[in-house]
Amino acid sequence: MRLKLIAIIAVAFLAGGVLAFAMRGEGPKPVSVGTAAIGGAFSLTNQFGKRVSEKDFAGRYLLVFFGFTHCPDVCPAGLQVMSAALDKLGAKAGGVMPIFVTVDPARDTPEVMKAYVSAFHPRLVGLTGTEAEIQAATKTYRVYAKRVDDPGSPGGYTMDHSGFIYLMDRAGAYLTHFSHGANPDEIANRIASLD
Ligand code: NI
């Protein structure tokens, strides 16, 4: 019993030493994730059939979420979280542009996007485009999206995709991201803390 306790203390002491060593900067350096590499220019079509680019949203914070309208769970959850966060922001929500970009342009035409986004929030923008444009946008935002066979879905396929909600600053640069299952308060508070 006592030996075990001594062993635990010894291990803790050792771990502390290693940590202190690493914190002095002599250990292996943590790998830096290049946040500047997330987001950027895009050229897409909104739910009204109008061509838009990142320049159309300059001067506003962006909440950007990628998904597809046939998504059974992740997308509705993410869009509900975004919508709830906007509602919690009150007057400040005007400075934020909520954007839903499809990863499934074959099925998500502007008309389909229009009906879908309006069911979540009146200010939600839905963006689609050609396969090449959507591929470019997902690459820019480092979004994973892959077509998967699914005989039960319309067209015989579904989409696997990552489900992060990106918060971009007024110049379109990456600030942070949230999970699609994040608490709306967390997002609203983060945006409210910006000037
Ligand atoms: Ni989804």
Image (tube, rainbow, N blue to C red):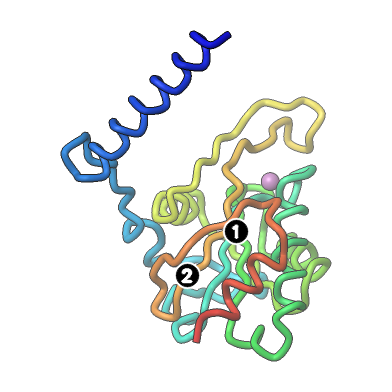
Residue at 69% over, 32% down: 157
In the displayed orientation, state which residue is furthest to the left. 26
What's under tag 2, amino acid-wise? Met
Q: Position of residue 20 (x, y in %)?
A: 28, 40
Q: Secondary structure at mark 1?
A: strand
How many numbered marks, from 0 up? Answer: 2
Of the 4 image quadrants, the one containing the N terminus is top right
Residue at image point 46% right, 86% down: 59
Label ID, residue 168 = 2
Query: As rendered, which of 194 and 25 lies closer to the eye?
Result: 25
Q: Residues within 10 Å of mark 2 (few under 14, many from 20)?
A: many
Residue 64, how many percent across, how many down?
Answer: 56, 64
Residue 91 left/right relative to 10: right
- Mark 2 and mark 1 lie on one chain; the one further toward the N terminus is 1
Residue at x-position 47% and y-position 70%: 168
Q: Position of residue 52 (x, y in %)?
A: 50, 75
